[in-house]
Image: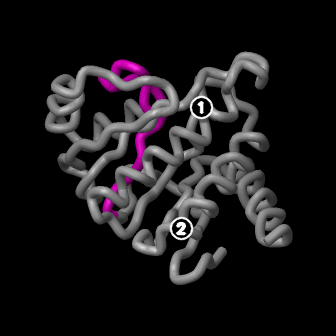
Amino acid sequence: MRIGGSRIELVLGDITQQDTDAIVNAANLSLLGGGGVDGAIHRAGGPQILAECRRIGGCAAGDARITTGGLLKARHVIHAVGPIYRDGRSGEPELLASAYQRSLELASRFKLRSVAFPAISTGAYGYPAREAAEIALRTIAAYLREHPEIELVRVVLFSPRAYEIHADALRELQEAA
């Protein structure tokens, strides 16, 4: 999807292999690593990332922090903490949108032109994939309309099913535009 001079693209793949200026980590509150995307990024990026995360000292749900990319192709990792899904009526949609928004604000502040996101909160945090995809893509598109300095936002999906869900949500977003 094109938005002015920017674009949103979906890919099936491994976020740790992305060559964007930054990749986004679906982090936990401590920022000290965990399972899924978080663990994979910490393992692939090496000890520099963990050392910076220790200095930062954690992050609230709906917020984000930035560190070096360590050994990754990406120069930076933006650690975004999404919400744990409970019932969809406990502030989860707002917190999820905020995690994407704050990540993009950091990308702008650090003059990054390309960012790769995973599907934040859809793994161990249990956010329903379809709802999460709609929130993520709507938030990204709205930000790019106001911030053309970010040229590319890539959403990297780990499974064919997650890719399909995001592709459907992106088509609907384009049709509504």
Left or right: 24 in relation to 45: right
Quarter of the view holding residue 56: top left
**Residue 34: in magenta span:** yes
SS class, disc 1 = helix
Quarter of the view holding residue 85: top right
Task: Point out residue 176 in the picture as x, y percentages from the top left corner.
Answer: 84, 68
What residue is drawn where x is 58% and y is 48%? 158
**Residue 167: in magenta span:** no
Quarter of the view holding residue 74: bottom left
In this rendering, the label closer to the viewer, 1 or 2: 2
SS class, disc 2 = helix
- Where 16 sits versus 32, above or below? below
How many badges with numbers are in the image?
2
Q: Which residues are magenta?
A: 21-37
Task: Point out residue 105 in the picture as x, y percentages from the top left corner.
Answer: 41, 52
Instruction: Spot the residue most to the front.
Output: 146
